[in-house]
Image (spheres, helix red, strand yellow):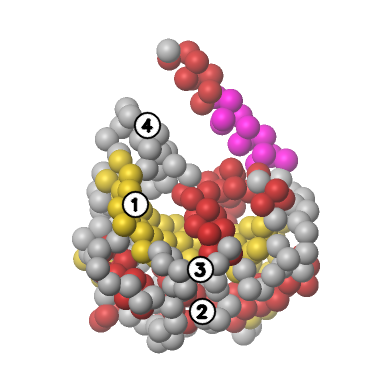
Amino acid sequence: MIKPLYSCLWFAFFSLSFFVSKAQLISDSLLIEGRQRVFVYDKSVKTKPGASLVFVMHGSGGEPRGLVPKAAKLQARAEAENVVLVYPAGYKRYWNECRKASTALANTENVNEEAFFSAMIDYFSKLYKINKANVFATGFSGGGHMSYKLALTMPGKIKAISAIVANMPTEENMDCTPMHVPLPVMITNGTADETNPYNGGEVKTSGVTLGTVRPTEESFQYWAKLDGYSGPPAKSMFPDANPNNNITVEKYTYAQKGKPEVTLLKVVNGKHEFVTDFDMFEESWAFFKRQIKK
């Protein structure tokens, strides 16, 4: 049984490697308040007018090209799904998101992220004739925090977000002025995450201080209450794609007609990493597609 499994894994790895090597990844930049802000996208993708736009954001200290292989499955289906994936770069590898305690230059220099993302939306509207009503944001760790910021401060331009291994900042660590607009939100967090504690507390990372975050359940309920929900969410289980590890995925969802969907993927025993039990970015796109149909 080991040999066929190895062959399947090798084929999957080869397929993704082939895609990454064939992609025509290019970097471009926009001048935002005296700073050149960089983003990466696959120039080879041919979409139809009215395509959706998805921002895929790296974590604190990361960079766009390092994230591209993680989104390879979704990127390979971009034309079929009529979606443009854009990988923005944080300012000096970090985002000016909503954590007041952040010692990253992006925060201490208060770079204008809203202007950057608004400019990228206009850029791809001209280049690809995207549908500005279908602009989404997802990100890993610090990129998840940047997704929260976009939902909090510019909901008129962002239709839905998917925050991965990221909790909302605590109130004392909140550095944004929320607009309190209901929005579809999906959160994916691991219960064994020592960097972004599932039950809240101090974010532990090297190089910068980032302060404290809320518990996952509180982050989830923040959006549920804002979107008009009360009571317990519906619960279901993901199929156990890898029975050889100790990870299971519980799904909690608020979804009613006329209200934005709010979903939590609780990765039991999941750490601060990309799990192998499901593709986080493909699941994010499935969530976004459900919002397009509403």
Q: Indicate which disc, 4 or 2, sits on the residue closer to the N terminus.
A: 2
Amino acid type of the residue that numbered disc 2 sits on in the rendered structure: Pro
In front of the other: 148 or 14 = 148
Task: Work out whether 73 lies above or below 195.
Answer: above
Quarter holding residue 189: bottom left
How would you classify the magenta stretch by its main secondary structure? helix
Q: On residue 160, which mark appears? A: 3
| Residue drawn where x is 33% and y is 48% of the image | 236
- Disc on res. 242: 4
Q: Report whether 41 appears left or right of 229.
A: right
The correct choice, above or below, for 252 with respect to 242 in the image is below
The mark that comes first in sequence, 1 or 3, is 3
Give residue 286's mark: none
Kind of residue at disc 1 = Lys
Residue indicated by mark 2: 155
Where is residue 60 drawn, in percent x and y? 43, 62
Q: Residue 53 at x, y = what percent?
A: 64, 64
Question: Callout 1: few (<14), some (14-19), or many (20+) C-alpha neighbours within 10 Å?
Answer: some
Where disc 2 sits, the SS reads: loop
Q: Is residue 142 left or right of residue 215?
A: right
Residue at 42%, 12% (x, y): give it: 1
The amino acid at mark 3 is: Ala
User: Separation of disc 1 and disc 4 at Cα?
Assistant: 17 Å
Look at the picture and state if 97 lies above or below 59.
below
At label 4, which amino acid type do we have? Asn
User: What is the count of numbered marks?
Assistant: 4
| Image: magenta residue range | 10-22
The Cα–Cα distance between marks 4 and 3, rounded to whole angstroms, is 29 Å
